[in-house]
Image: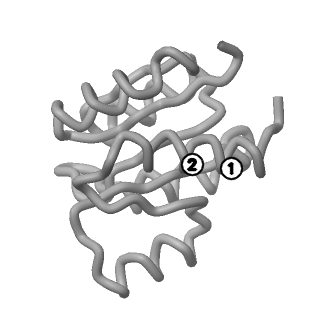
Amino acid sequence: MDKKILIIDDDKMILKLADYVLKDEYEVKCASSGIDGIDMIQDFEPDLIMLDIEMPMMNGFEVMSLVKQNKKWNRIPILMFTSSADRETVLKAKRLGVNDYIVKPFLPEKLLESVEKTFGRNAHK
């Protein structure tokens, strides 16, 4: 279990599901807000961030912007998930450098496949 994943989502069911699907293969930590997620990045040093777009106070695009602006964090791959599958949102996420985009609700297999694909392309540890 050498890869670490930080999941940031305000939906507790999504956090529980993602943690359950990934915990056997990866070290997983969860944050229930963008603000908490940013605080956790420094100490946890994740190899991957899974990020919801639609969150109160600090949305996923704001979190991603802070991550990409930080020289210590900007190489961390980001997977975004949201219930919004409209073309404009997907294009904005891709423009900002998201590695993959998962629409909620998602199948556990899709989540694991996306994580494995991302690590296959972005293994940096």
Q: Is residue 22 left or right of residue 8?
A: right
x and y, in percent, of residue 83 in the image: 22, 62
Which badge, 2 or 1, is on the more N-terminal residue? Answer: 2
x and y, in percent, of residue 104 in the image: 26, 56
Q: In the image, what residue occupies the spot 50% across and 52% down?
A: 79
Callout 1 amino acid = Asn
Label annotation for residue 67: 2
Q: In the image, what residue occupies the spot 44% across and 36% down?
A: 38
Q: Is residue 29 left or right of residue 27?
A: left
Q: Quadrant of the C terminus?
A: top right
Q: In the image, what residue occupies the spot 40% across and 62% down?
A: 61
Q: In the image, what residue occupies the spot 35% across and 32% down?
A: 18
Residue nearest the observer in this picture, 96 or 62: 96
Q: In which image quadrant can residue 32 be found?
A: top left
Q: Residues within 10 Å of mark 2 (few under 14, many from 20)?
A: many
Question: Which residue, given by chain and number where applicable, does mark 1 sit on?
Answer: 74
x and y, in percent, of residue 76 in the image: 66, 44
Label 2, label 1: how far apart the Cα atoms are: 6 Å
Q: Is residue 12 left or right of residue 71?
A: left
Callout 2 amino acid = Val
**Does 64 sit above or below residue 5?**
below
Question: Helix, strand or loop at disc 1?
Answer: loop
x and y, in percent, of residue 72 in the image: 72, 38
Disc 2 to disc 1: CB gap under 8 Å: yes
**Does 28 sit above or below residue 76?**
above
Question: Helix, strand or loop at disc 2?
Answer: helix
Q: Quadrant of the N terminus?
A: top right
